[in-house]
Amino acid sequence: MVPKTENEMKGLIAAVRQLERIKKRARALGIFTDDRELLECSGCGLKEDVTFEGLLMTYDKNATLLEDSGLRFNRIDETSYACPACGAMVRVEDETTIQLVEEEEKPRKKIVF
Ligand SMILES: [Zn+2]
């Protein structure tokens, strides 16, 4: 869709700016804006998740009750986070890891030649 008039273009720019403001406010409120993969600590099993309301939360993956622990991973740099529970370094999954996860989730089919 290409905006036809100048007014439509202005409307589009205003909408994009508004979206940026909303995202900024959402992050401040603790809402996960989907800018990165969810983290999981391999050291202690603390896992990030997003609630039904879109809020970022963490919980122990071995816990039976999925309640927000109140802990948040501390960002070190673009790809590294520190686990707030045990201090272990957690790296954001790169594309190869994501591909592997996706393959695992697909139903397994037997390939017959
Ligand atoms: Zn940990």
Image (tube, rainbow, N blue to C red):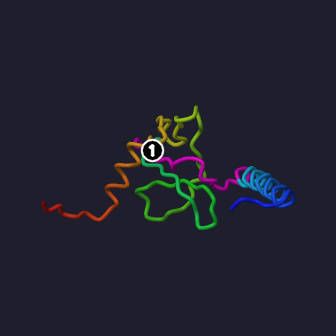
- Picture quadrant where residue 55 is located: bottom right
| Image quadrant in which the C terminus is located | bottom left
Q: 24 or 50, which lies in front? A: 24
- Picture quadrant where residue 18 is located: bottom right
Residue 11, x across and y down, in percent: 83, 59
> Cβ of disc 1 within 8 Å of ligand 1?
yes
Q: Is residue 56 above or below residue 96?
A: below
Part of the protein shown in magenta: 27-43
Q: 68 or 100, which lies in front? A: 100
Q: Is residue 11 above or below residue 43?
A: below
Residue under pointer 1: 41
Q: Is residue 19 left or right of residue 43?
A: right
**Residue 36 painted magenta:** yes
Residue 8, x across and y down, in percent: 82, 61
Residue placed at 85% from the left, 55% from the top? 10
Q: Is residue 88 left or right of residue 19?
A: left
